Image (spheres, coloured by chain):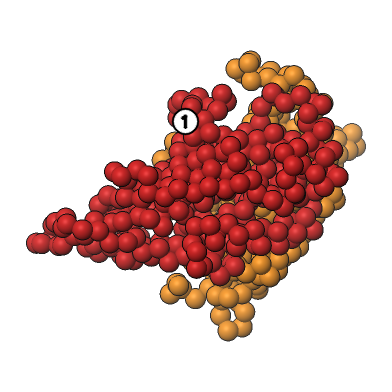
Chain colours: A red, B orange
Amino acid sequence: MTSATLSRIRQNQIAHLIANGKRLDGRGLLDYRPINIEMGLIEKAEGSARVSLGKTEVMAGIKIEIGEPYPDRPNEGVLTTNAEFVPIASPEFEAGPPTEDSVELARVVDRGIRESKAIDLEKLCIIPGKKVFIVFIDIYVLNHDGNLIDASALAALAALKNTKIFKYEVKDGEVVIQPGFEELPLVNYPVAVTVADIGGKLVVDPWLEEEEVMNARLTISFDKDGKICAMQKGGSGALSPEKIIEAVKIAKDKSEELRRLVVKNA
Amino acid sequence: MSNVRLVDENGIRTDGRRLDELRPIRLEVGVLSNADGSAYIEQGKNKIIAAVYGPREVHPRHLALPDRALLRCRYHMAPFSVQERKSPAPTRREVELSKVIREALEPAIFLERFPRTSIDLFIEVLQADGGTRAAGVTVASLALADAGIPMRDLVVACAAGKADGYIILDLNDIEDKEGEADVPVAYMPSLNYVSLLQMDGQLTPKEFEQAFNLALEGCRKIYELQKQSLKAKYLAIKEAVEEAES
Protein backbone atom coordinates (compact mmCIF):
# COMPACT_ATOMS: atom_id res chain seq x y z
CA MET A 1 0.00 0.00 0.00
CA THR A 2 2.91 2.27 -0.59
CA SER A 3 2.86 5.42 -2.62
CA ALA A 4 5.57 7.90 -3.48
CA THR A 5 3.58 10.79 -2.06
CA LEU A 6 5.48 11.19 1.19
CA SER A 7 8.54 13.38 1.12
CA ARG A 8 11.86 12.07 2.38
CA ILE A 9 11.90 14.78 5.05
CA ARG A 10 8.53 13.69 6.38
CA GLN A 11 9.58 10.02 6.25
CA ASN A 12 12.72 10.73 8.22
CA GLN A 13 10.81 12.83 10.71
CA ILE A 14 8.33 10.02 11.38
CA ALA A 15 11.06 7.41 11.81
CA HIS A 16 13.23 9.72 13.90
CA LEU A 17 10.39 10.60 16.28
CA ILE A 18 9.50 6.94 16.75
CA ALA A 19 13.12 6.06 17.46
CA ASN A 20 12.79 8.56 20.33
CA GLY A 21 9.54 7.06 21.57
CA LYS A 22 7.19 9.66 20.07
CA ARG A 23 4.72 9.81 17.21
CA LEU A 24 3.73 12.56 14.84
CA ASP A 25 0.11 12.52 15.99
CA GLY A 26 1.09 12.64 19.65
CA ARG A 27 0.23 9.02 20.45
CA GLY A 28 2.38 6.72 22.54
CA LEU A 29 4.01 3.84 20.64
CA LEU A 30 1.53 1.35 22.04
CA ASP A 31 -1.63 3.48 21.76
CA TYR A 32 -4.40 2.96 19.26
CA ARG A 33 -6.09 5.93 17.65
CA PRO A 34 -9.59 6.66 19.04
CA ILE A 35 -11.89 3.79 18.14
CA ASN A 36 -15.58 4.12 17.49
CA ILE A 37 -17.91 1.22 16.73
CA GLU A 38 -21.50 1.49 15.55
CA MET A 39 -23.54 -1.63 15.03
CA GLY A 40 -26.59 -2.50 13.00
CA LEU A 41 -26.88 0.50 10.72
CA ILE A 42 -27.85 -1.31 7.52
CA GLU A 43 -31.38 -2.63 8.02
CA LYS A 44 -31.35 -4.79 4.91
CA ALA A 45 -28.20 -6.64 5.95
CA GLU A 46 -28.45 -9.48 8.46
CA GLY A 47 -25.65 -7.81 10.38
CA SER A 48 -23.55 -4.68 9.99
CA ALA A 49 -21.06 -2.44 11.72
CA ARG A 50 -19.01 0.64 11.04
CA VAL A 51 -15.66 1.06 12.73
CA SER A 52 -13.49 4.13 12.78
CA LEU A 53 -9.88 4.01 13.84
CA GLY A 54 -8.85 7.64 13.82
CA LYS A 55 -9.60 8.70 10.27
CA THR A 56 -9.69 5.14 8.95
CA GLU A 57 -13.27 4.04 8.41
CA VAL A 58 -14.44 0.58 7.51
CA MET A 59 -17.89 -0.90 7.20
CA ALA A 60 -18.69 -4.59 7.36
CA GLY A 61 -21.96 -6.05 6.18
CA ILE A 62 -23.18 -9.60 6.69
CA LYS A 63 -25.55 -11.22 4.23
CA ILE A 64 -26.93 -14.69 4.75
CA GLU A 65 -28.18 -16.92 1.99
CA ILE A 66 -29.10 -20.55 1.58
CA GLY A 67 -26.79 -22.60 -0.59
CA GLU A 68 -24.93 -25.87 -0.92
CA PRO A 69 -22.23 -26.99 1.51
CA TYR A 70 -18.73 -27.93 0.41
CA PRO A 71 -18.69 -31.64 -0.52
CA ASP A 72 -15.99 -32.38 2.07
CA ARG A 73 -17.92 -30.58 4.85
CA PRO A 74 -21.55 -31.64 4.28
CA ASN A 75 -22.65 -30.74 7.82
CA GLU A 76 -21.26 -27.22 7.96
CA GLY A 77 -22.38 -23.80 6.83
CA VAL A 78 -20.10 -21.80 4.56
CA LEU A 79 -18.17 -18.66 5.44
CA THR A 80 -16.82 -16.33 2.75
CA THR A 81 -15.06 -13.03 3.24
CA ASN A 82 -14.50 -10.36 0.65
CA ALA A 83 -13.00 -6.86 0.80
CA GLU A 84 -13.63 -3.97 -1.54
CA PHE A 85 -11.30 -1.02 -1.82
CA VAL A 86 -13.89 1.35 -3.26
CA PRO A 87 -12.52 4.50 -4.91
CA ILE A 88 -14.24 6.82 -2.43
CA ALA A 89 -11.80 5.68 0.24
CA SER A 90 -8.51 6.93 -1.15
CA PRO A 91 -7.00 8.70 -4.17
CA GLU A 92 -4.91 5.54 -4.58
CA PHE A 93 -7.90 3.22 -5.01
CA GLU A 94 -9.35 2.49 -8.41
CA ALA A 95 -12.53 0.69 -9.37
CA GLY A 96 -11.88 -2.72 -10.86
CA PRO A 97 -11.01 -6.29 -10.01
CA PRO A 98 -9.67 -7.07 -6.51
CA THR A 99 -6.09 -5.99 -5.92
CA GLU A 100 -3.40 -7.96 -4.15
CA ASP A 101 -3.92 -5.78 -1.06
CA SER A 102 -7.67 -6.28 -0.93
CA VAL A 103 -7.30 -10.04 -1.37
CA GLU A 104 -4.76 -10.13 1.45
CA LEU A 105 -6.98 -8.04 3.71
CA ALA A 106 -10.00 -10.29 3.16
CA ARG A 107 -7.96 -13.45 3.67
CA VAL A 108 -6.35 -12.26 6.91
CA VAL A 109 -9.73 -11.22 8.36
CA ASP A 110 -11.22 -14.52 7.20
CA ARG A 111 -8.37 -16.52 8.75
CA GLY A 112 -8.91 -14.97 12.20
CA ILE A 113 -12.63 -15.78 12.15
CA ARG A 114 -12.27 -19.23 10.59
CA GLU A 115 -9.33 -20.51 12.65
CA SER A 116 -10.78 -19.33 15.97
CA LYS A 117 -13.99 -21.17 14.98
CA ALA A 118 -15.85 -17.98 15.83
CA ILE A 119 -18.98 -19.12 14.03
CA ASP A 120 -20.36 -22.53 14.95
CA LEU A 121 -20.71 -23.63 11.34
CA GLU A 122 -22.37 -26.94 12.22
CA LYS A 123 -25.35 -25.01 13.57
CA LEU A 124 -25.73 -23.45 10.12
CA CYS A 125 -26.50 -26.77 8.49
CA ILE A 126 -30.12 -27.05 7.31
CA ILE A 127 -30.20 -30.34 5.35
CA PRO A 128 -26.86 -32.22 5.55
CA GLY A 129 -25.09 -32.35 2.21
CA LYS A 130 -27.81 -30.30 0.52
CA LYS A 131 -28.67 -27.00 2.15
CA VAL A 132 -26.75 -24.81 4.54
CA PHE A 133 -26.52 -21.14 5.42
CA ILE A 134 -23.79 -19.19 3.66
CA VAL A 135 -22.42 -16.28 5.65
CA PHE A 136 -21.01 -13.53 3.44
CA ILE A 137 -18.78 -11.03 5.20
CA ASP A 138 -18.20 -8.00 3.01
CA ILE A 139 -15.64 -5.47 4.12
CA TYR A 140 -16.12 -2.03 2.64
CA VAL A 141 -13.31 0.45 3.13
CA LEU A 142 -14.77 3.97 3.31
CA ASN A 143 -11.72 6.01 4.24
CA HIS A 144 -8.16 4.72 4.16
CA ASP A 145 -5.83 6.22 6.72
CA GLY A 146 -3.83 3.11 7.56
CA ASN A 147 -4.19 -0.17 9.47
CA LEU A 148 -7.11 -1.48 7.47
CA ILE A 149 -6.59 -5.00 8.80
CA ASP A 150 -7.34 -4.22 12.46
CA ALA A 151 -10.25 -1.94 11.59
CA SER A 152 -11.72 -4.54 9.23
CA ALA A 153 -11.33 -7.43 11.66
CA LEU A 154 -13.05 -5.36 14.35
CA ALA A 155 -15.83 -4.33 11.96
CA ALA A 156 -16.36 -7.95 10.89
CA LEU A 157 -16.55 -9.12 14.51
CA ALA A 158 -18.95 -6.31 15.48
CA ALA A 159 -21.12 -7.06 12.45
CA LEU A 160 -21.21 -10.78 13.25
CA LYS A 161 -22.11 -9.90 16.85
CA ASN A 162 -25.38 -8.29 15.73
CA THR A 163 -26.20 -10.73 12.94
CA LYS A 164 -29.64 -12.28 12.91
CA ILE A 165 -30.66 -15.29 10.84
CA PHE A 166 -34.23 -15.71 9.63
CA LYS A 167 -36.15 -18.63 11.12
CA TYR A 168 -37.04 -21.50 8.85
CA GLU A 169 -38.79 -24.84 8.64
CA VAL A 170 -38.00 -27.78 6.42
CA LYS A 171 -41.11 -29.11 4.61
CA ASP A 172 -40.69 -32.02 2.16
CA GLY A 173 -37.01 -31.21 1.66
CA GLU A 174 -37.74 -27.55 0.98
CA VAL A 175 -36.76 -24.67 3.24
CA VAL A 176 -39.68 -22.45 4.17
CA ILE A 177 -38.83 -19.12 5.75
CA GLN A 178 -40.75 -18.30 8.91
CA PRO A 179 -41.36 -14.97 10.61
CA GLY A 180 -38.82 -13.96 13.24
CA PHE A 181 -35.06 -14.16 13.67
CA GLU A 182 -32.44 -16.00 15.66
CA GLU A 183 -28.96 -14.92 16.66
CA LEU A 184 -25.99 -16.12 14.65
CA PRO A 185 -24.15 -18.80 16.68
CA LEU A 186 -21.08 -16.70 17.41
CA VAL A 187 -18.93 -18.59 19.93
CA ASN A 188 -15.53 -16.91 19.74
CA TYR A 189 -14.32 -13.34 19.39
CA PRO A 190 -11.11 -13.05 17.36
CA VAL A 191 -9.35 -9.68 17.31
CA ALA A 192 -6.44 -8.66 15.07
CA VAL A 193 -3.62 -6.43 16.28
CA THR A 194 -1.07 -5.03 13.84
CA VAL A 195 2.37 -4.12 15.09
CA ALA A 196 4.74 -2.19 12.80
CA ASP A 197 8.51 -1.95 12.94
CA ILE A 198 9.50 1.67 12.35
CA GLY A 199 12.77 3.34 13.24
CA GLY A 200 13.87 0.18 15.05
CA LYS A 201 10.89 0.30 17.42
CA LEU A 202 7.55 -1.48 17.51
CA VAL A 203 4.36 0.56 17.34
CA VAL A 204 0.72 -0.53 17.21
CA ASP A 205 -1.96 0.72 14.83
CA PRO A 206 0.23 2.38 12.18
CA TRP A 207 -1.57 5.13 10.29
CA LEU A 208 -1.13 5.72 6.57
CA GLU A 209 2.09 7.73 6.67
CA GLU A 210 3.64 5.33 9.15
CA GLU A 211 2.74 2.45 6.86
CA GLU A 212 4.70 4.14 4.10
CA VAL A 213 7.75 4.40 6.32
CA MET A 214 7.55 1.04 8.09
CA ASN A 215 10.08 -1.69 7.57
CA ALA A 216 7.51 -4.42 8.07
CA ARG A 217 4.29 -5.17 9.90
CA LEU A 218 3.08 -8.19 11.77
CA THR A 219 -0.61 -8.83 12.34
CA ILE A 220 -1.50 -11.26 15.10
CA SER A 221 -5.07 -12.39 15.79
CA PHE A 222 -6.01 -13.68 19.22
CA ASP A 223 -9.14 -15.58 20.19
CA LYS A 224 -11.09 -15.02 23.43
CA ASP A 225 -8.89 -17.48 25.35
CA GLY A 226 -5.67 -15.69 24.43
CA LYS A 227 -4.66 -18.22 21.78
CA ILE A 228 -3.13 -17.04 18.53
CA CYS A 229 -5.42 -17.94 15.63
CA ALA A 230 -3.85 -16.10 12.67
CA MET A 231 -0.69 -14.26 11.75
CA GLN A 232 0.51 -12.33 8.76
CA LYS A 233 3.74 -10.50 8.13
CA GLY A 234 3.51 -7.76 5.54
CA GLY A 235 5.75 -5.16 3.99
CA SER A 236 9.00 -5.51 2.15
CA GLY A 237 11.31 -5.60 5.17
CA ALA A 238 12.31 -8.30 7.64
CA LEU A 239 12.12 -8.71 11.43
CA SER A 240 14.48 -10.32 13.90
CA PRO A 241 13.12 -13.34 15.83
CA GLU A 242 13.37 -11.33 19.08
CA LYS A 243 11.20 -8.55 17.64
CA ILE A 244 8.59 -11.09 16.60
CA ILE A 245 8.31 -12.55 20.09
CA GLU A 246 8.06 -9.01 21.50
CA ALA A 247 5.34 -8.16 18.97
CA VAL A 248 3.31 -11.19 20.05
CA LYS A 249 3.41 -10.02 23.68
CA ILE A 250 2.36 -6.48 22.77
CA ALA A 251 -0.43 -7.72 20.55
CA LYS A 252 -1.84 -10.06 23.19
CA ASP A 253 -2.36 -7.22 25.69
CA LYS A 254 -3.84 -4.96 23.03
CA SER A 255 -6.19 -7.65 21.75
CA GLU A 256 -7.92 -7.79 25.12
CA GLU A 257 -8.48 -4.02 25.07
CA LEU A 258 -9.96 -4.16 21.58
CA ARG A 259 -12.21 -7.11 22.32
CA ARG A 260 -13.79 -5.32 25.27
CA LEU A 261 -15.00 -2.64 22.86
CA VAL A 262 -17.16 -5.19 21.02
CA VAL A 263 -17.93 -7.77 23.69
CA LYS A 264 -18.48 -6.25 27.10
CA ASN A 265 -18.16 -9.45 29.12
CA ALA A 266 -15.53 -11.40 27.19
CA MET B 1 -11.20 -32.27 15.95
CA SER B 2 -10.01 -34.76 13.36
CA ASN B 3 -10.41 -38.52 13.24
CA VAL B 4 -7.04 -39.04 11.58
CA ARG B 5 -4.15 -39.99 13.81
CA LEU B 6 -1.15 -37.90 12.79
CA VAL B 7 1.39 -38.92 15.45
CA ASP B 8 1.56 -42.42 16.99
CA GLU B 9 2.50 -43.37 20.57
CA ASN B 10 6.19 -43.51 19.63
CA GLY B 11 6.14 -39.96 18.27
CA ILE B 12 6.26 -41.15 14.65
CA ARG B 13 4.27 -39.34 11.96
CA THR B 14 2.15 -40.73 9.11
CA ASP B 15 5.09 -40.69 6.71
CA GLY B 16 7.47 -42.28 9.23
CA ARG B 17 9.23 -39.09 10.29
CA ARG B 18 10.12 -37.99 13.81
CA LEU B 19 8.54 -34.78 15.15
CA ASP B 20 11.51 -32.58 14.24
CA GLU B 21 12.49 -34.28 11.00
CA LEU B 22 12.42 -32.65 7.57
CA ARG B 23 11.16 -34.46 4.49
CA PRO B 24 13.89 -35.55 2.06
CA ILE B 25 14.94 -32.54 0.00
CA ARG B 26 16.55 -32.47 -3.42
CA LEU B 27 17.67 -29.17 -4.92
CA GLU B 28 19.00 -28.45 -8.37
CA VAL B 29 20.18 -25.14 -9.79
CA GLY B 30 20.17 -24.06 -13.44
CA VAL B 31 17.47 -26.34 -14.80
CA LEU B 32 16.00 -24.17 -17.59
CA SER B 33 18.13 -22.81 -20.43
CA ASN B 34 15.96 -19.82 -21.42
CA ALA B 35 15.64 -18.29 -17.98
CA ASP B 36 18.34 -16.03 -16.52
CA GLY B 37 18.19 -18.14 -13.42
CA SER B 38 16.28 -21.25 -12.43
CA ALA B 39 16.06 -23.94 -9.80
CA TYR B 40 14.08 -27.03 -8.90
CA ILE B 41 13.08 -28.45 -5.54
CA GLU B 42 11.65 -31.71 -4.38
CA GLN B 43 10.61 -31.69 -0.75
CA GLY B 44 8.75 -34.88 0.02
CA LYS B 45 6.18 -35.11 -2.76
CA ASN B 46 6.38 -31.38 -3.52
CA LYS B 47 7.89 -30.69 -6.92
CA ILE B 48 8.39 -27.02 -7.70
CA ILE B 49 10.31 -25.18 -10.39
CA ALA B 50 11.28 -21.50 -10.27
CA ALA B 51 12.56 -19.22 -13.01
CA VAL B 52 13.90 -15.67 -12.93
CA TYR B 53 13.95 -13.27 -15.86
CA GLY B 54 15.81 -10.03 -15.34
CA PRO B 55 16.90 -7.49 -14.47
CA ARG B 56 15.22 -6.49 -17.75
CA GLU B 57 13.20 -3.68 -19.25
CA VAL B 58 9.84 -3.20 -17.51
CA HIS B 59 6.61 -3.87 -19.38
CA PRO B 60 4.38 -1.91 -19.15
CA ARG B 61 6.91 0.87 -18.86
CA HIS B 62 5.01 3.15 -16.49
CA LEU B 63 5.50 0.59 -13.72
CA ALA B 64 9.26 1.21 -13.69
CA LEU B 65 10.63 2.61 -10.45
CA PRO B 66 13.14 5.46 -10.61
CA ASP B 67 15.32 4.29 -7.72
CA ARG B 68 15.16 0.50 -7.74
CA ALA B 69 14.15 -2.61 -9.60
CA LEU B 70 10.56 -3.75 -9.59
CA LEU B 71 10.30 -7.28 -8.19
CA ARG B 72 7.33 -9.19 -9.53
CA CYS B 73 6.41 -12.62 -8.33
CA ARG B 74 3.88 -15.14 -9.51
CA TYR B 75 3.18 -18.25 -7.48
CA HIS B 76 1.10 -20.61 -9.55
CA MET B 77 -0.10 -24.18 -9.23
CA ALA B 78 -0.35 -26.48 -12.22
CA PRO B 79 -3.85 -27.89 -12.81
CA PHE B 80 -2.49 -31.42 -12.32
CA SER B 81 -0.57 -30.63 -9.13
CA VAL B 82 -3.37 -31.65 -6.77
CA GLN B 83 -5.91 -34.48 -6.47
CA GLU B 84 -8.87 -32.55 -7.91
CA ARG B 85 -7.89 -30.57 -11.02
CA LYS B 86 -7.23 -26.97 -10.15
CA SER B 87 -8.38 -24.36 -12.64
CA PRO B 88 -5.31 -22.63 -14.10
CA ALA B 89 -6.81 -19.19 -13.36
CA PRO B 90 -5.16 -17.63 -10.32
CA THR B 91 -7.11 -18.16 -7.10
CA ARG B 92 -7.27 -15.69 -4.23
CA ARG B 93 -4.89 -17.97 -2.36
CA GLU B 94 -2.34 -17.74 -5.16
CA VAL B 95 -2.69 -13.95 -5.28
CA GLU B 96 -1.98 -13.74 -1.56
CA LEU B 97 0.92 -16.19 -1.69
CA SER B 98 2.50 -14.33 -4.61
CA LYS B 99 2.45 -11.21 -2.44
CA VAL B 100 3.89 -12.76 0.72
CA ILE B 101 6.58 -14.61 -1.24
CA ARG B 102 7.58 -11.39 -2.99
CA GLU B 103 7.77 -9.64 0.37
CA ALA B 104 9.85 -12.53 1.74
CA LEU B 105 12.46 -12.13 -1.01
CA GLU B 106 12.50 -8.33 -1.41
CA PRO B 107 14.58 -7.60 1.70
CA ALA B 108 17.32 -9.95 0.47
CA ILE B 109 17.83 -8.42 -2.97
CA PHE B 110 19.89 -5.31 -3.74
CA LEU B 111 17.00 -3.87 -5.79
CA GLU B 112 18.54 -0.39 -5.69
CA ARG B 113 21.35 -1.60 -7.97
CA PHE B 114 18.97 -1.96 -10.93
CA PRO B 115 16.73 1.11 -11.17
CA ARG B 116 14.07 1.18 -13.91
CA THR B 117 14.24 -2.58 -14.49
CA SER B 118 12.09 -5.50 -13.47
CA ILE B 119 13.05 -8.80 -11.95
CA ASP B 120 10.31 -11.28 -12.77
CA LEU B 121 10.07 -14.40 -10.71
CA PHE B 122 7.83 -17.32 -11.60
CA ILE B 123 7.15 -20.21 -9.27
CA GLU B 124 5.32 -23.15 -10.78
CA VAL B 125 4.10 -25.84 -8.43
CA LEU B 126 4.10 -29.06 -10.45
CA GLN B 127 3.02 -31.24 -7.56
CA ALA B 128 1.77 -30.04 -4.18
CA ASP B 129 1.95 -31.91 -0.89
CA GLY B 130 1.81 -29.25 1.82
CA GLY B 131 4.29 -26.48 2.49
CA THR B 132 4.51 -25.26 -1.11
CA ARG B 133 4.89 -21.59 -0.18
CA ALA B 134 7.91 -22.41 1.97
CA ALA B 135 9.48 -24.68 -0.64
CA GLY B 136 8.62 -21.99 -3.21
CA VAL B 137 10.62 -19.38 -1.30
CA THR B 138 13.57 -21.76 -0.89
CA VAL B 139 13.70 -22.57 -4.61
CA ALA B 140 12.98 -18.98 -5.75
CA SER B 141 15.90 -17.70 -3.75
CA LEU B 142 18.18 -20.22 -5.52
CA ALA B 143 16.86 -19.13 -8.92
CA LEU B 144 17.64 -15.49 -8.04
CA ALA B 145 21.15 -16.45 -7.00
CA ASP B 146 21.53 -18.50 -10.19
CA ALA B 147 20.53 -15.41 -12.20
CA GLY B 148 23.50 -13.65 -10.62
CA ILE B 149 21.34 -11.11 -8.82
CA PRO B 150 23.25 -9.69 -5.85
CA MET B 151 21.67 -10.67 -2.55
CA ARG B 152 22.29 -9.95 1.11
CA ASP B 153 21.62 -13.57 1.99
CA LEU B 154 19.78 -16.58 0.65
CA VAL B 155 16.19 -16.76 1.84
CA VAL B 156 15.11 -20.13 3.09
CA ALA B 157 11.68 -21.14 4.30
CA CYS B 158 10.18 -23.95 6.31
CA ALA B 159 6.97 -24.51 8.24
CA ALA B 160 6.37 -25.86 11.69
CA GLY B 161 3.04 -26.52 13.32
CA LYS B 162 1.03 -28.64 15.67
CA ALA B 163 -0.58 -32.03 15.17
CA ASP B 164 -2.17 -34.30 17.80
CA GLY B 165 -0.84 -31.92 20.44
CA TYR B 166 2.79 -32.19 19.29
CA ILE B 167 4.87 -29.39 17.79
CA ILE B 168 6.14 -30.73 14.44
CA LEU B 169 8.47 -29.61 11.67
CA ASP B 170 7.80 -29.39 7.92
CA LEU B 171 4.12 -30.33 7.67
CA ASN B 172 2.97 -32.51 4.82
CA ASP B 173 -0.42 -32.16 3.16
CA ILE B 174 -2.45 -34.21 5.63
CA GLU B 175 -0.75 -32.60 8.65
CA ASP B 176 -1.46 -29.19 7.15
CA LYS B 177 -5.14 -29.99 6.55
CA GLU B 178 -5.94 -32.06 9.66
CA GLY B 179 -3.43 -30.64 12.13
CA GLU B 180 -4.06 -27.93 14.68
CA ALA B 181 -1.78 -25.19 13.35
CA ASP B 182 0.63 -24.25 10.59
CA VAL B 183 3.39 -21.62 10.89
CA PRO B 184 5.34 -20.98 7.68
CA VAL B 185 8.53 -18.96 8.22
CA ALA B 186 11.06 -17.50 5.77
CA TYR B 187 14.46 -16.67 7.19
CA MET B 188 17.80 -15.17 6.21
CA PRO B 189 20.09 -17.21 8.45
CA SER B 190 23.29 -15.18 8.17
CA LEU B 191 21.46 -11.93 8.89
CA ASN B 192 19.10 -13.47 11.47
CA TYR B 193 16.03 -11.83 9.93
CA VAL B 194 12.58 -13.29 9.32
CA SER B 195 10.94 -12.10 6.11
CA LEU B 196 7.79 -14.22 5.96
CA LEU B 197 5.65 -15.26 8.87
CA GLN B 198 2.10 -16.50 8.77
CA MET B 199 -0.01 -18.68 10.96
CA ASP B 200 -3.32 -20.41 10.92
CA GLY B 201 -4.85 -22.75 13.44
CA GLN B 202 -4.69 -22.31 17.19
CA LEU B 203 -1.58 -22.00 19.34
CA THR B 204 -0.90 -20.50 22.73
CA PRO B 205 1.84 -17.84 22.62
CA LYS B 206 4.19 -20.39 24.23
CA GLU B 207 3.42 -23.05 21.63
CA PHE B 208 3.88 -20.45 18.92
CA GLU B 209 7.36 -19.67 20.22
CA GLN B 210 8.27 -23.38 20.17
CA ALA B 211 6.94 -23.86 16.66
CA PHE B 212 8.61 -20.67 15.45
CA ASN B 213 12.00 -21.74 16.85
CA LEU B 214 11.60 -25.21 15.37
CA ALA B 215 10.86 -23.68 11.97
CA LEU B 216 14.02 -21.55 12.24
CA GLU B 217 15.96 -24.73 13.07
CA GLY B 218 14.55 -26.35 9.92
CA CYS B 219 15.47 -23.28 7.89
CA ARG B 220 19.09 -23.49 9.03
CA LYS B 221 19.28 -27.12 7.87
CA ILE B 222 17.79 -26.36 4.45
CA TYR B 223 20.15 -23.36 4.14
CA GLU B 224 23.11 -25.76 4.11
CA LEU B 225 21.47 -27.77 1.32
CA GLN B 226 20.83 -24.55 -0.63
CA LYS B 227 24.49 -23.58 -0.49
CA GLN B 228 25.59 -27.07 -1.51
CA SER B 229 23.28 -27.07 -4.52
CA LEU B 230 24.60 -23.72 -5.73
CA LYS B 231 28.17 -24.95 -5.44
CA ALA B 232 27.28 -28.22 -7.15
CA LYS B 233 26.34 -26.42 -10.35
CA TYR B 234 29.76 -24.78 -10.61
CA LEU B 235 31.63 -27.91 -9.55
CA ALA B 236 29.94 -29.73 -12.41
CA ILE B 237 31.05 -27.03 -14.85
CA LYS B 238 34.58 -27.12 -13.47
CA GLU B 239 34.79 -30.89 -13.86
CA ALA B 240 33.47 -30.69 -17.40
CA VAL B 241 36.10 -28.09 -18.29
CA GLU B 242 38.89 -30.11 -16.70
CA GLU B 243 37.80 -33.19 -18.55
CA ALA B 244 37.78 -31.32 -21.87
CA GLU B 245 41.26 -30.03 -21.22
CA SER B 246 42.79 -33.37 -20.22
User: Residue A66, how many percent across, how many down?
Assistant: 25, 52
Q: Residue B111 sits in which quadrant?
A: top right
State whether residue B25 appears in this view.
Answer: no
Left or right for A238, reference A117: right
Q: Residue B166 sits in which quadrant?
A: bottom right
Comparing B137 with A30, the one in front is A30
Comparing A98 with B172, the one in front is A98
Label 1 resides on the chain identified as A
Residue depicted at 58% across the width and 57% down the height: A258
Left or right for B34, reference A13: left
Residue B246 sits above or below residue A162 on the image:
above
Left or right for B62, reference B108: left
Report the residue marked by disc 1. Answer: A86
Quadrant of the image containing the C terminus of chain B: top right
Residue A37 sits above or below residue A57 on the image:
below
Of all residues shown, which one is farthest toward the left? A172
